Amino acid sequence: MIPAPAAHAMTSEKPAVALPTSAAAATVLTDEATQPKVEVKDLNVYFRTNHAIRHVSLSVQPQTVLAVIGPSGCGKSTFIRALNRMHDLVPGARVEGKVYVDGKDLYARGIDPVLLRRRVGMVFQRPNPFPTMSIYENVAAGLTLNGIGGNHHETVERCLRQAALWDEVKDRLKHAGTSLSGGQQQRLCIARALAVEPEVLLMDEPASALDPIATAKIEELIHELKEKYTIIIVTHSMQQAARVSDNTAFFYLGELIEIGPTAQIFTNPRERRTEDYVTGKFG
Amino acid sequence: MMNLHSSFLYRKMVDRGMAVVCALLFLVAFIPLLSVLWLVITKGAAGLSWDFFTQLPKPVGEEGGGIGNALIGTLAMVAIACVLGLPLGVGAGVYLAEKGDGTIGNTIRFMAEVLSGVPSIVIGIVAYALVVKPMGHFSALAGGVALAILMIPTLARATEELVRLVPGSLREASLALGVPNWKTSMRVVIRTAMSGIVTACLLAVARAAGETAPLIFTALNNQYWNFDPRAPTASLTVQIYNYAISPYDDWHTKAWTASLVLLLVVGMLNVASRVMTRSRLKGAR
Amino acid sequence: MSPASSGKSTSAAHTDKAFESDLRLVREKLLAMGAKVEEQIAKSMRSLTDRDSELGEQVKEGDIEVNRLEVDIDDLCRKILALRQPAASDLRLITTALKIVTDLERIGDLAVNIAERAMDLNQAPPLAAYVDMPRLAELAQEQVKKALDAFVRADTQEAEEVLAGDDHLDDLFVKIFNELLAFMMEDSRNIRRATSLVSICKHLERIGDHAVNVAEMVIYMVRGTDVRHPRSRAAAER
């Protein structure tokens, strides 16, 4: 029997993910065939003097799910909010670096943050349907509020079907958005986000306020949505990250420690800190 | 075990005792309200008639007469106050909620607090100086202005509170859909606070309708029909005052009836505020 | 080799203390099983060289404990998998444990087989010297010990030595086999006893193979790379 060579092979069956970088050397492994849907280069976010996100670079391939994990306070939410320029509305927040979606830098001069948020949608932790609107109006809100008139029935039905909610609400579209259960409300919010036809969907702990069955439905939904959209999901549950994502990024204290195929992160991570977090030694 | 049992009984007794105390206090608080209603209704109901609502006051000694002009006057001045006060009050409130965290905002807020504590008679004098003197005579306009000044501070504070109560997550959700900030404010945040704002407006209007002191220096009074806002105008409240301090019995009765009418107007405004702000959506929580 | 895959015990402990102690229990039981199995091999060989069938009986009884440990460790690992969803190094430890347990149990069975052959042989007069068999037994025992040490210390170097040493064992087996063949061809009355000896040697060689399996799993546990069946993997990659 011949002993195997000592070097460890990094086999990545999944398409490319970028290695963690230091500020100096950014090594990006890209799959030769496809350009990444989302590419982040040396992103830094400051809240006044607090350097919340430090020199983060990564890329996400189209129609894949990237999970962002890390202990609380590590900057996961801050990171994804930088991807649709939500920090523009926070006084004292400063974002440096580049965020490319389909090759276009979102932070370049002349880019309208309002328009970009229609291409990069977001779903939040607590379901937040508009209380003064019915289910129908909620789903169509992204269109009606933006002045796009007309009959939205087709869009509403399509999005509710995509969110796996149509069968449950088709008879009560005129009921208040808040009359649904928590899990249904969250799916309503997903349908609402889908109605503006984004290409990238950011999800900030979408299932953390839900019970296990509702959570399972949301996770199944993410599997289905993956076929059309590119999804980046923040989660504090490692098991959820393991279940839904293709690739996983581990953040700690504002830095990207490691990013790789999910299976690899959870069986054989490269970094000590990732290993410690994933095995429950801290956080 | 004995200890548990006796302490349980003790707690039960204390609980009952406090419940009785609370009920008594409630009655003590409620009795004046009930007695006011009782008095007004019993003493004023007899005088209600179609004539009462449509006729001018008659001189002493003559039978009949009514408060027609006072009713119109009150309605007119309240309308003027609404036109001036509601936009300014709600607008100031929205401004304070959206952008009011700087020095300007804090100053405005402080001024609003101070103003809301100013006695209404002082407001009347201010309106006198602002409107009556330049115009040279008393008018419904001045009365309306005085009432508006009364409405604005409380309305601004209430609106600001209501808008701030709208959860930030709704604003975020709207922004994340690619809706511009100003539109988000108007069509999502304020719309959500709207039912509260309408209630606040109606309550402000109800208060304005019941004020007397500011109208004394501004609208004065008028014994005749008056549809010109630039002329002195009668109002329910001033008329009630005049009737009440007079030495004539039958004017006293008229005062009671007019009070009843005023209560009814305020009551209707309250009901209206409830009806108008009920949710039209089924199953809304 | 990055720090994460060195497998050395980290200064940090699991936040969940019950989990930490469960993992420790798995290691302890595996070590106990390994020690028992090493003892079984030694005893079975002594029952042959010392012609002591009493020892042979002890070996047969000792197998009960080996089997019990196998069941215990399997149960514990299953429980950990179900309740703790172990990840990364913890996951590799548990899956390694599940595999090692099988190999150790097989080694135990082989020791019993050796003891049975020995008890059989003890009823007949000895067949000359047992040539190099004690040497083979020594090697096999050494391999098992080294593999278990590698597990305890998470030492891939020692594991690699086990992998390298297997050739030596195989060669020695072939040499002994040829010698025994010679015995059989010399005198047909030797055949019965010689074939028993061949069996024993085969068992020892198999024990060596199982030690190699353990060493391969140790390498996986520490490094996270699976080094088994290199030729098949190479073929698959081509």
Image (cartoon, rainbow, N blue to C red):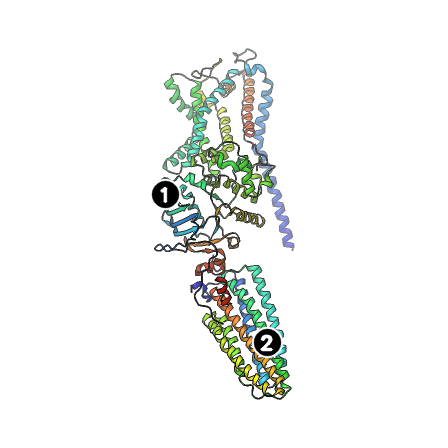
Compare residues B13 and A126 and report the one nearer the observer: A126
**Type of residue at label 1?**
Ala
Chain of the residue where label 2 is placed in the rendered structure: C
Find numbered disc 2 in the image and state the secondary structure of the residue it sits on. helix
Q: Which mark is residue A108?
A: 1
Residue B197 locus on image (x, y percent):
49, 32
Task: Please indicate, yes or no, whether residue B143 appears anywhere in the rendered image.
Answer: yes
In the rendered image, the vertical position of residue A130 relative to residue C221, given as above or below: above
For mark 2, what is the residue?
C110
- Secondary structure at badge 1 equals loop
User: For the C terminus of chain B, which image quadrant?
Assistant: top right
Name which residue type carries label 2: Leu
Q: Is residue B126 left or right of residue C173?
A: left
Please identify the quarter of the rendering in which residue B44 is found: top right
Q: Is B267 displayed left or right of A42 in the figure?
A: right
Query: A9 or C138: nearer the eye?
Result: A9
